[in-house]
């Protein structure tokens, strides 16, 4: 994914909103993510710490943001530390940010080289009472790797054991979950590029194409618009479309199968998240169409309820109620069995076993407050599905929805979802 110029006022405003949540005598430190090693001298492409990006717009590795709103030295109230460019880095890695460029991107006036960090930080710590440091608090993060943030936190606590340490993640998550207008623009562009990719596939998919060729078409379309896969694409034909995180993407698409595409582009660090399920031969069988339309009805019923005050748990319960009704209509579940089911293990969960909505933004499963009521400015996915493994196929649909004061806005409303439209476009 390519760097995109963003108005620095976004980052200026984000820092201002964070300062509004801090008690007096606070110091905040946010570190870049590490460049992760692979084998030998290999490394993964650098993925910036989303919180650092949110507060600065800076993508360069090793950068550090320090906020100390009550610092005695006025120019130390907001400091960005970056790598000092040098000849060797220039030859091997290319251009590194100058101080003026770092100011231009972030709106931070005081930019220093990293070598100055220990001295400046010590003077700020002598004034500070509360130190706000960052940890990954995503409920499903299962990482054992010590991040740069965690290394810094441990070193800081060793060096300054008597300060009061506080959790920055909660504050930044509460801000990030409500999208600013500039962020919505970037998300809309990510959705548009995703739509271009999907429309390209409707012309490309036919019996005999390999899932990896489908992936290559998408990569081409996303990249030429300065996008790139928002996450590992799931391109699953036939029975594999019931494998929730399938991403081998190397099977031949056969006539009569359904192809599940959970594929989306990012743009300027913001991620779209789309799922469509299309017939490989261009027409749904009558049974596939029944199931497809059932999932589309669930999708529409849930989107309609994505309104302020609801929680994602409410949305999941609603999805399950709707899915149960559809499964009975489809003859998959019997009404009498449902009436007798264990409420703690409802029968529908064999056919729909995941959540229906997650926040979306700088991360695909974005930070937020899972138990909090949803509010205007949240962007959530809506992704109901029915997986009928006994019948050899599943259907999932997923769009990205902006919650507003009134009716929800579907950011993917232009991406074909009606079965008739998909068939018509595949035939054209
Ligand atoms: N593509 C990941 C998800 O839908 O949550
Ligand atoms: Mn999703
Ligand atoms: Mn998805």
Image (spheres, rainbow, N blue to C red):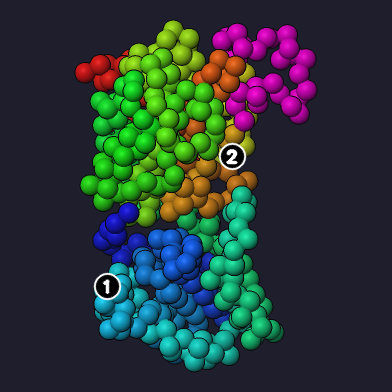
Residue at image location 56% in from the left, 67% down from the top: 147
Q: Is residue 314 visible?
A: yes
Q: Relative to 333, is 170 above or below?
A: below
Locate residue 8, reporting x and y percent: 31, 66
Q: Pointer 2: residues within 10 angstroms few (<14), some, or many (20+)?
A: some
Label 2 sits on residue:
311
Residue at image location 38% in from the left, 16% down from the top: 255
Residue 126 magenta-highlighted: no
Check whether the beta carbons of the residues at disc 1 and disc 2 lie within 8 A of each other.
no
Q: Relative to 153, is 311 above or below?
A: above
Residue at image location 34% in from the left, 16% down from the top: 281
Q: Relative to 191, is 338 above or below?
A: above
- Magenta region: which residues? 325-353
Locate residue 364, reporting x and y percent: 46, 47
Classify residue 342 by image quadrant.
top right
Q: Secondary structure at mark 1?
A: loop
Dot placed on the residue nearer the N-terminal end, 1 or 2 = 1
Locate residue 349, reporting x and y percent: 65, 26
Label 1 sits on residue:
94
Q: Pointer 1: residues within 10 angstroms few (<14), some, or many (20+)?
A: few
Q: Is residue 20 left or right of residue 323?
A: left
The residue at label 2 has a CB less than 8 Å from ligand 2: no
Q: Is residue 157 left or right of residue 122?
A: right
Classify residue 269 by image quadrant.
bottom left
Residue at image location 33% in from the left, 48% down from the top: 228
């Amino acid at each position: 994914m390519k760097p995109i110029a963003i108005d620095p006022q976004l980052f200026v405003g984000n820092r201002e909103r964070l300062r509004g949540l801090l008690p007096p005598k606070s110091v905040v430190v946010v570190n870049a993510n590490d460049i992760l090693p692979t084998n030998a001298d290999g490394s993964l492409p650098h993925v910036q710490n989303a919180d650092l990006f949110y507060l600065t717009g800076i993508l360069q590795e090793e950068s550090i943001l320090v906020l100390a709103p009550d610092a005695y030295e006025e120019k130390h109230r907001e400091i960005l530390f970056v790598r000092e460019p040098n000849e060797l880095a220039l030859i091997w890695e290319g251009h590194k940010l100058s101080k003026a460029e770092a100011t231009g991107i972030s709106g931070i006036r005081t930019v220093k080289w990293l070598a100055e960090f220990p001295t400046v930080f010590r003077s700020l710590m002598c004034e500070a009472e509360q130190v706000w440091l960052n940890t990954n608090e995503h409920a499903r993060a299962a990482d054992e790797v010590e991040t740069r943030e965690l290394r810094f936190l441990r070193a800081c606590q060793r060096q300054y054991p008597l300060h009061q340490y506080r959790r920055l993640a909660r504050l930044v998550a509460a801000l990030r979950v409500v999208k600013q207008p500039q962020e919505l623009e970037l998300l809309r562009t990510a959705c548009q590029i995703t739509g271009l990719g999907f429309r390209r596939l409707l012309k490309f998919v036919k019996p005999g194409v390999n899932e990896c060729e489908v992936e290559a078409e998408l990569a081409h379309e996303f990249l030429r618009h300065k996008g790139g896969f928002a996450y590992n694409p799931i391109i699953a034909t036939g029975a594999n479309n019931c494998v929730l995180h399938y991403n081998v993407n190397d099977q031949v698409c056969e006539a009569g199968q359904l192809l599940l595409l959970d594929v989306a582009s990012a743009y300027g660090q913001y991620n779209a998240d789309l799922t469509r399920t299309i017939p490989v031969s261009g027409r749904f069988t009558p049974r596939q169409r029944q199931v497809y339309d059932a999932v589309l009805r669930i999708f529409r019923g849930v989107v309609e309820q994505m309104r302020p005050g609801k929680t994602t748990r409410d949305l999941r319960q609603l999805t399950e109620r709707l899915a149960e009704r559809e499964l009975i209509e489809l003859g998959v579940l019997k009404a009498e069995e449902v009436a007798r089911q264990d409420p703690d293990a409802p029968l529908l969960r064999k056919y729909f076993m995941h959540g229906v909505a997650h926040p979306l933004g700088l991360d695909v499963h974005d930070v937020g407050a899972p138990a909090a009521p949803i509010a205007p400015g949240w962007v959530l996915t809506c992704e109901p599905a029915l997986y009928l493994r006994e019948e050899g196929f599943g259907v999932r649909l997923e769009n990205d929805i902006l919650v507003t004061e009134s009716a929800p806005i579907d950011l993917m409303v232009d991406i074909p979802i009606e079965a008739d439209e998909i068939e018509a476009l595949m035939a054209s």
